[in-house]
Image (cartoon, rainbow, N blue to C red):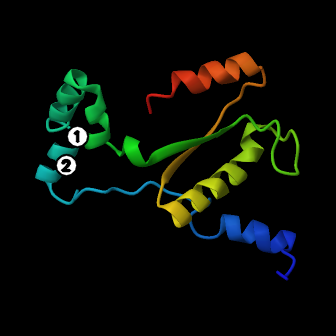
Amino acid sequence: MAKKVSKKEALAYHAEGRPGKIEVIPTKKHSSQRELSLAYSPGVAEPCIQIDKKKDDVYKYTAKGNLVAVISNGTAVLGLGNIGPEASKPVMEGKGLLFKIFADIDVFDIEVDATDVDKFVETVKAISPT
């Protein structure tokens, strides 16, 4: 059986080094001016134009195919109940960490300040192109 986790140990784990449990890191070379020009402007225009012509190419030229959102408004968090969006963030980051280490799926954790179900759903639908 696993040893009980103390409050002090849990808080230290989350605060140690760079706070939180997840980060975004580049997948392309980015050390030269040329590489930065390819990554952003002017090079980024070409995949944008291609995606505009053929929407499914978004999966060819972006991270969309390996990216999910873990979204919460913090109203029903694990055994914690309604703790709000900010307090739910560590749980959402933890879910993101599990997706990454067990399935190599990249995650954006998104906390929404909306308790009205229709507003929450509207927000999620609005960001779904991500």
Quadrant showing the C terminus: top left
Whether residue 112 appears in this view of the structure is yes
Where residue 53 sits: x, y (%)? 20, 22
Where residue 25 sits: x, y (%)? 39, 57
Give the residue drawn at x 55%, y 65%.
102
Give the residue drawn at x 88%, y 51%.
79
Q: Is residue 35 above or below residue 128?
A: below
Give the residue drawn at x 24%, y 28%.
51
- Secondary structure under badge 2? helix
Q: Amino acid at mark 2?
A: Leu
> How far is mark 1 from mark 2, CA to CA?
6 Å
Q: In front: 110, or 16? A: 110
Where residue 41 sits: x, y (%)? 18, 36
- Mark 2 Cα shell of 10 Å, populated few (<14), some (14-19), many (≥20): some
Position of 10 compared to 34: left or right? right
| Residue that carries the numbered disc 2 in the rendered image | 36
Q: Which mark is residue 69?
A: none
Give the residue drawn at x 59%, y 27%.
124
Where residue 65 sits: x, y (%)? 39, 44
Q: Amino acid at mark 1?
A: Tyr
- Mark 1 Cα shell of 10 Å, populated few (<14), some (14-19), many (≥20): few
For residue 50, what is the image quadrant?
top left
Is disc 1 in contact with disc 2, using a CB cutoff of under 8 Å?
yes
Q: Is residue 111 above or below residue 125?
A: below
Q: Is residue 29 above or below residue 78?
A: below
| Residue that carries the numbered disc 1 in the rendered image | 40
